[in-house]
């Protein structure tokens, strides 16, 4: 009897990781899809900022920029989309902090010509750092332990909210993602046909080469542990996802990620470590590094824009 019980237990499906896909549809609708069940929840917001950044999902909450009284306001909601949004504050823009569960807000509103002041807050609204200094001109690209990454004329450097010190320009054209002290973006003088990973402290650069015969396209993203970088690639107008080691080198195609003419919008799950991406027919597939093939999930979406995964 014990043997029969053990056999039945082995046949039970493995528990699904808690993953959610978040995106904006229409003008002001927030949507959350539970990957394990395929259930979708939606909520109409009063206004979502047209000049704001992408959505950020962390610690079970989605952080987004809205418009209140003609100002850009950063807010957060639980992934259930229930309850009153938590107001984090007015800002020109925001980026995820290098510390988990936190975001940096810079400036006061996206219509201002300069950004003055920066605040770090937890995603549920507790302030953890504050600076009244004026930020250098440019675009807020990311955050690293040493400060905020400001992009000026496509070249990034690190600005310290504490001291106001501006670091040396780093050998990248723009910044797409950050993990701890590492930044990833387009390699210098490569017209974004190659990516590179740069250490924001030393400026050391590591080249990421696309798979043979493919060209890079879209935003590279670090895996949650920072060991891999994922990015879309194209060959003869057909898409796939590639993975490269963050230490540099040639990327390989993610098995099962060839999506034909469908652009594979993708993001990493911080809870499971899987890479989730959009496949033909509105399907959502998931790939766990080291496994032989990306698998189909129960989630579906007709959304064609960026996806944020929690």
Image (tube, rainbow, N blue to C red):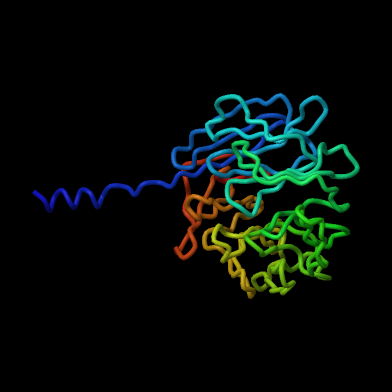
Residue drawn at the location 73% of the way across and 57% of the way down: 147
Residue drawn at the location 78% of the way across and 66% of the way down: 172
Task: Examine the image and state in which quarter residue 116 appears.
Answer: top right
**Foreground residue among 81 and 13:** 81
Number of residue marks: 0
Residue 279 in sight from this viewpoint: no
Q: Is residue 157 left or right of residue 261?
A: right
**Foreground residue among 81 and 107:** 107
Most extreme residue toward the right is: 113
**The C terminus lies in quadrant:** top right
Most extreme residue toward the left is: 1
**Foreground residue among 82 and 309:** 82
Task: Examine the image and state in which quarter residue 275 appears.
Answer: bottom right
Q: Where residue 215 sits: x, y (%)? A: 72, 66
Residue 67 in sight from this viewpoint: yes
Q: Is 191 rendered above or below residue 127?
A: below
Q: Is residue 50 left or right of residue 178?
A: right
Q: Where residue 213 sits: x, y (%)? A: 68, 71
Q: Is 216 rendered above or below residue 304?
A: below
Q: Where residue 131 sits: x, y (%)? A: 77, 46
Task: Examine the image and state in which quarter residue 206 appears.
Answer: bottom right
Most extreme residue toward the front is: 163
Q: Where residue 110 sits: x, y (%)? A: 83, 39
Residue drawn at the location 49% of the way across and 38% of the way down: 34
């Amino acid at each position: 009897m014990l043997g029969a019980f053990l056999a039945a237990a082995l046949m039970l499906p493995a528990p699904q990781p808690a993953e959610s896909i978040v995106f904006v549809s229409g003008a002001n609708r927030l949507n959350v899809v539970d990957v394990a069940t395929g259930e979708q929840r939606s909520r109409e917001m009063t206004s979502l900022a047209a000049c704001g950044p992408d959505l950020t999902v962390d610690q079970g909450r989605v952080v987004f920029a809205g418009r209140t009284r003609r100002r850009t306001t950063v807010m957060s909601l639980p992934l259930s989309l229930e309850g009153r949004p938590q107001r984090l504050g007015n800002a020109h823009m925001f980026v995820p902090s290098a510390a988990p569960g936190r975001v940096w807000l810079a400036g006061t509103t996206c219509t201002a010509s300069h950004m003055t002041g920066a605040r770090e807050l937890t995603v549920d609204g507790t302030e953890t750092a504050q600076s009244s200094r004026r930020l250098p001109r440019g675009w807020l690209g990311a955050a690293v332990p040493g400060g905020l990454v400001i992009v000026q004329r496509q070249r990034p450097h690190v600005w310290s909210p504490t001291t106001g010190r501006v670091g040396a320009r780093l050998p990248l054209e723009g910044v797409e993602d950050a993990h701890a002290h590492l930044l990833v973006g387009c390699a210098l003088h490569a017209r974004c046909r190659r990516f590179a990973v740069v250490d924001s402290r030393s400026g050391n650069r590591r080249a990421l080469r696309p798979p043979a015969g493919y060209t890079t396209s879209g935003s590279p993203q670090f895996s949650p542990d920072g060991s891999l970088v994922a990015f879309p690639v194209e060959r003869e107008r057909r898409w796939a996802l590639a993975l490269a080691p963050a230490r540099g080198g040639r990327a390989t195609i993610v098995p099962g990620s060839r999506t034909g003419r469908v652009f594979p919008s993708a993001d990493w799950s911080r809870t499971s470590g899987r890479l989730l991406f959009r496949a033909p027919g509105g399907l959502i597939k998931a790939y766990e590094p080291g496994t032989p093939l990306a698998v189909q999930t129960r989630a579906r979406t007709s959304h064609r824009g960026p996806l944020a995964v929690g």
